[in-house]
Image: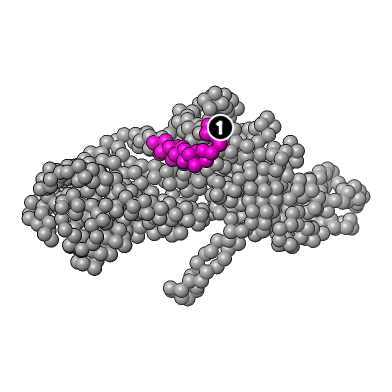
Amino acid sequence: MGGGGEIVIEVDRVRKTFVQRRRIAGQRLRRERVDVHAVQDVSFTVRAGEIIGYLGPNGAGKSTTIKMLIGVLTPSAGRLRVAGLDPARQRIALARQIGVVFGQRSTLWWDLPLRDSFELVRHLYRVPPGQYRANLAHFVDMLDLGPFLDTPVRQLSLGQRMRGDLTAAFLHDPAIVYLDEPTIGLDVVSKAAVRSFLVEKNREQATTIMLTTHDTADIEQLCQRVLVIDHGRLGFDGDLATLRDRLGGERTLVVDLAAPLPRLTVATPGARVVRTDGPRQWLAFPAKASAAPLVAEIAARYPLVDLAIREPPIEDVITRLYTAGTPSAPGTKAAPATEAAAT
Amino acid sequence: MASHSGGADATSGISRVRGLLWAEVRAYALLVRVAFREAAQYRTSLALRSLTEAAATVLDLAAIGIIFAHLPALDGFSLAEVAFLYGTSALAFALAEAFLGPIDRLGWHIREGRFDVVLIRPVSALVQTATLAFSPQRVARAVQPAVIVLVSCLAVPVHWTPDRVLLVPAMVLCGTVLASSAFVTTAAVLFVAPDASVAVAASTQGSALAARYPMTVYGHHVALLLTLVLPIGFVSWLPALHVLSRPDPLGLPTALRFASPLVAAAGMAVAAFSWRAGVRRYRSTGS
């Protein structure tokens, strides 16, 4: 897994520019043309069997990139190859080899029972009957679809619908699957079901998976590699640990004192109190620094009862990345611009 | 399909195209069946709509009968001849409407983000768009003009030679292709301007109405424009002149009366080009 397979996705200096017409303030009829660069000179490659998290704030260009990879949108410039095909030109041939899940929009037939939607997918993708039966039986078992197989899609809950959408996307054994926010709005149980399903498909059939998400647990549990895009530019390409290291971030020391005290003043470099609540105080300190000097200092100077250390949540890491400013050179992988902001 | 080898490149190319077309036709048939099944989920609604559609058809026929009964001739064309023109063009547009009419909702699908889902399926976007809102009622709308064509064929004073007999279904077929091409071409505009549905509907409805009457009622210049530029005249007016053995009031060459298949083929080419250009410009919606 990860890195061993052949290259299945090739993105080379791809750009997508939308022309928007905006009304000029104070003028009724005249409009000005504005070029909106949704994706700018993005380059990366994906090997067979990787699970990739494609991250970025809303409007960063995640969906635009995914839609170009599917062939829904035509790139304005650059070169795209997925499974050796040009997505926009060879959309239909490519469609047989990929699966797509939109978290916010079902690809199933609203008024048909779930089972009929699957049957239709079988026809459209020409799945051999044996393979279809085996896959469906397996997915029904894994995702517990049995109780609502005969329910029209419009009557399904969000979690049920998502499990149905996942099944539909994997029925034809696609080599590559894109998921756009697959766990959005799901409860904990459904999220776990989605994640373990993806992990299994990836492990057993080396399915290449690329997902966009805002769910940090998705990233931590699924993604071997993350790509971060912001303002249409790729800002990071690497694994999660590297991302954490690069951005540094801060760990938190939570101390319980014998009595409520004013904000502690500590001499350890970089450490400071960020929050107090009665006898409990939170101190932030650099993630790379050892906690020992800080703990020793507090224990020596104040009535310390208990303490706990918290790792920087991945959310904060991502937030820092998004707010770290614009990356430097276009088209670079793992742009170093983010480093400057981290130090 | 790949059984040919050696110098059979052209043949295998043709059989590949045929295979692709056949696949699209099968997908179309499958998706139409699905649309029927989906419509059948709402039985009362389906029954009510079928009932009103049937009532509308009967009333339409009655209204046309009454109008024609008070109209001995229109611009030198007898009642039966006008009915023939009216019926053949209305039938062509009704058939086009039945098969491809639902693509006028493309703008709505785009705004709702449903067109993204269309583009992830391994089936042509046109086939899917045409079947997304397929309704059985639209097919029923072809019944009324078909009745008018049959009745008027019996009523016109025509000596039915084989060429005239053949020309009637041929002109309806070419007319259907032309009307379909017009639908597709105008719908392609919606890729650039998804909110222009009303304008698009008006232009296709307008041409459907314009094609129903003898071109001469519009006056010489407009008639020439409608016939040659738009080319509504090829739907039924020009071939009908041959069927009815009429001289051309506009004085156009008689060869044009048999040119509808060529014009239809050109129309298809324009439609295919516009549709593809439209899909390339598709902008999707934010998520």
Determine crowd level at label 1: few under 14, some 14-19, many 20+ residues with C-alpha closer than 10 A.
many
Name the residue type under label 1: Leu
Residue A312: x, y in percent?
77, 48
Q: Decide whether residue A71 is among the magenta residues.
A: no
Front position in the image: A65 or A85: A85
Front position in the image: B174 or A195: B174
- The colouring scheme, among rainbow, by chain, secondary structure or one colour, is one colour
* Residues in magenta, as a range: B3-29
Residue A45, visible in the rendered structure: yes
Residue hosting label 1: A171
Q: Which residue is drawn at 50% across and 67% down?
A: A21
Helix, strand or loop for disc 1:
loop
Residue B152: x, y in percent?
14, 46
Q: Residue at x 64, y 53 (%)?
A: A79
Is B113 on the left or on the right of B85, as rendered? Answer: right
Q: Decide whether residue B25 is among the magenta residues.
A: yes
Q: Residue furthest bottom?
A: A26
Residue B56: x, y in percent?
20, 45
Q: Which residue is drawn at 29% across and 53% down?
A: B259
Q: Which residue is drawn at 43% across and 56% down?
A: B274
